Amino acid sequence: QVRLVESGGGLVQAGGSLRLSCAASGRTSSSYYMGWFRQAPGKERELLAFVSWSTGTTYVADFVKGRFTISRDNAKNMVYLQMNSLKYEDTAVYLCATKAATAASFGSWGQGTQVTVSS
C-alpha cells in the first residue's frame, strides 16, 4: 500500500502562486502514475495533472494548462504541483493519488490540502 501526504496549501491572493507537495511512502513501486486532483464544495472531484514515475511524461488538464505544472523527484518520492496565476475559482481541497499501470483508475488517496484563493 502507498501512503500519500500532501502539503503546501494555504491562503493566497488572486494572482499569487503556491507549490503543493505530495510525499509518497510504502509500496511506491506499484505506483506508475501520480496525479493531482481537486474538489471544491458541492462539485465533483476533477483531475488536474498526472506524471509517470518512470518516464516523467506529464498530462495537464486543458482548464489549468499554462498555469499549473506537475513534476516529480524520484529520489525523494515526491510529486509537486506548481500553481501560478491563481484564481478565486481554484479554491478547493487538493489531493494526490496513485495509479498502477494496469489499474483502471487512481487509488491510494492522500488526505488533501486546502487551497483558498482570496479575490
Image (cartoon, rainbow, N blue to C red):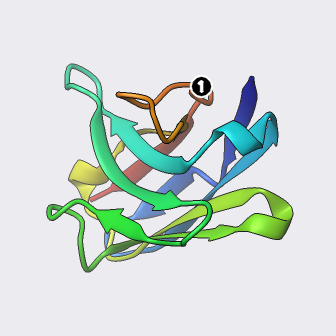
Specify the quadrant that holds the C terminus: bottom left
Instruction: Give the vertical position of 84 relative to 19 (above or below).
Output: below
Q: Is residue 44 left or right of residue 20?
A: left
Q: Position of residue 67 (x, y in %)?
A: 30, 75
Question: Which percent across, then down, holds residue 118?
Answer: 35, 55
Q: Hey, what amino acid is under mark 1?
A: Ser
Q: Residue at x 44, y 71 (%)?
A: 57
Question: 104 or 74: which is nearer to us?
Answer: 104
How many marks the image carries: the answer is 1
Give the farthest residue toward the front: 102
> Dividing the picture into quarters, in which one does residue 75 lie?
bottom right
| Location of residue 34 in the rendering, given as x and y in whole percent from the top left corner | 54, 49
* Residue occupying the point 58% across, 50% down: 9
Local SS, label 1 = loop
Q: Residue at x 56, y 33 (%)?
A: 112
Viewer-closest of 56 and 12: 56
Q: In the figure, is residue 28 to the left or right of 99?
A: right
- Check the picture and name the quadrant holding the N terminus: top right
Q: Residue at x 25, y 80 (%)?
A: 66
Residue neighbourhood size for the residue with mark 1, other residues' Cα within 10 Å, grouped as few (<14), some (14–19), many (≥20): some
Residue 31 drawn at (x, y percent): 62, 42
Relative to 21, 32 lies left or right: left
Q: Is residue 110 above or below residue 34?
A: above
Residue identified by numbered label 1 = 108
Picture layout, residue 102 above or below residue 90: above
The answer to whether 31 is drawn above or below residue 42 in the figure is below
